[in-house]
Image (spheres, rainbow, N blue to C red):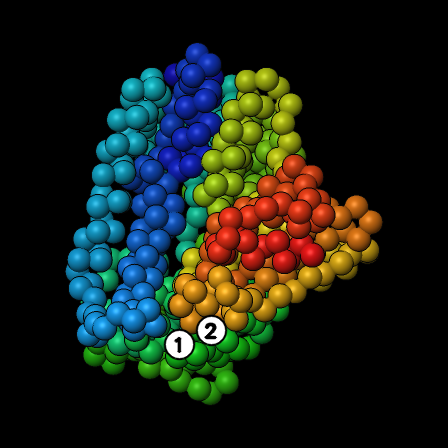
Amino acid sequence: MEHYDFIALGGGNAGLTAAKRIRAAGKKVALIDPTPIGGLCALRGCNPKKVLVRAVEVLNVVREASRHGIAIGEPAIVWEAVIARKRSFTDAVPARTEQDLGEAGIEYIEAAPRFTSSESLEAGSRTLSFDQVLVAAGSAPRELDFPGAAHVRTSDDILDLSDVPRRLAIIGSGVVAFEFAHVFLRLRSEVHMLMRGRDALKRSETGVVKHAIEHLRALGLRLHADVEVSALERTGAAYHVRLDNGESVAADFVLNAAGRPPVLDALALEEADVEYSARGVKVDHFLRSISNRKVFAAGDAHGRMQLSPIASYEGAVVAENVLQGDTRRVDYSAIPTVVFMDPPLADVGLTEDEARGKGLDIDVVTQDMADWIVFRIAGEGAPAHGKAIYDKRTGRVLGAHLFGPGADDNIHVFAMAMRYGITRGQLSEMIYAYPTFGSAMAYLAQ
């Protein structure tokens, strides 16, 4: 049996970050992943998706050129070129990642891992023992259970479409659903969003989400709330999505955006005495398994926040706790998140309802900024809304929620304020470059 100081199960942000840092400290490290390594974000998530978002952003700028006195004909998108550009960011990732691991002295084992005891596992034909191990095997699209569900496609498939679908049906109402709905609405596809309940983007501020939905509806989104898919039928190249309210939606492509549970079942976690549920491995504040202290979980594996920057952060936390004992707790209190649309929607911290639910004495500032000079000069004709929540006594920032041009960058102003204790008064006193989108943030602190 071969022994390692540390083994990472998964070649995404969490596993790579932890493995590299622990190897840099001189430990014997292996990384095991049966799939092309590099992680969801680099291969099938954030980066390739942002390429598509950027393409339709540019398309919209060209369409809106007349707002700036520029005469131009109706632009045409060359979808094959967009997908080719996307592949220029993804195709080289596995080989480059494997090379980086080799140069770092980390052994990469391309196999499906499976625990055999609380301190050993199998990888292919090999049996390995470990001092400590990280479960970071990522996530997979949620399995759907209705007749015809096998015809539903995933985000992997939509990122490789050879043609723009004329009609798109999206099952789900989270970040992935909103981002792809926006892309294909800008491409003038007919887009249906099939929402299980009545609340979309549940981690975001309700009022700001309503503005985002209104914006997508103005682009043509057809939102179906409080519905379940009862069946999917195929007729030639087309599909008919049957809903439990008796309605039927015709589509050329049906996307599963109903969430991504962690990939855990094949790991045989019970053999390692690791407690877990459908949400993920049960961990403490140090990201250690509550039942087997040799096992950590990070990234999508514990079901907390499925974001690539958090996976990298957690990988660093795991590395520190492996090398120095349990000295670093995870802190998710000031993590900015963005839904990449045009314009983007961004959040950090508590929503107003969450703050009031905690019994906090708060001040809330809400601004509709679309008619402000900085946004009118940009000439994008886009909505712009902001909301900030403050502790009434201390002036500390408790949360901020933005929807409008520049929101994806401006949210960091509030995230930094939360992390380093910058108060509402200090934010309002700061001198911002003008006229910038960032300068509008001062008015969310007044």
Labelled pair 1, 2 in contact (Cβ < 8 Å):
yes
Residue shown at 63% from the left, 58% from the top: 443
Residue 275: give x, y in percent of width and height: 60, 39
Q: Quadrant of the N terminus?
A: top left
Amino acid at pointer 1: Leu
Give above or below for 205 relative to 133: below
Q: Nearer the viewer, residue 78 or 407?
A: 407
Residue 219's disc is 1
Residue farthest to the bottom, as pictured: 246
Q: Which numbered dot is residue 276? A: none
Q: CA distance from mark 1 to mark 2?
A: 7 Å
Which amino acid type corresponds to the residue marked 2 in the rendered image? His
- 183 or 112: nearer the eye? 183
Q: Label 2 belongs to which residue?
A: 215
Quadrant of the image containing the C terminus: bottom right
Q: Residue at x 64, y 31 (%)?
A: 329
Answer with the quarter of the image where residue 70 lies: bottom left
User: Residue 102 at x, y = what percent?
Assistant: 29, 22
Query: For the view shown, which residue lies furthest in the top direction?
Result: 26
Rendering coords of residue 158 (x, y %): 30, 61
**Residue drawn at (24%, 33%) of the image:** 95
Number of numbered markers:
2
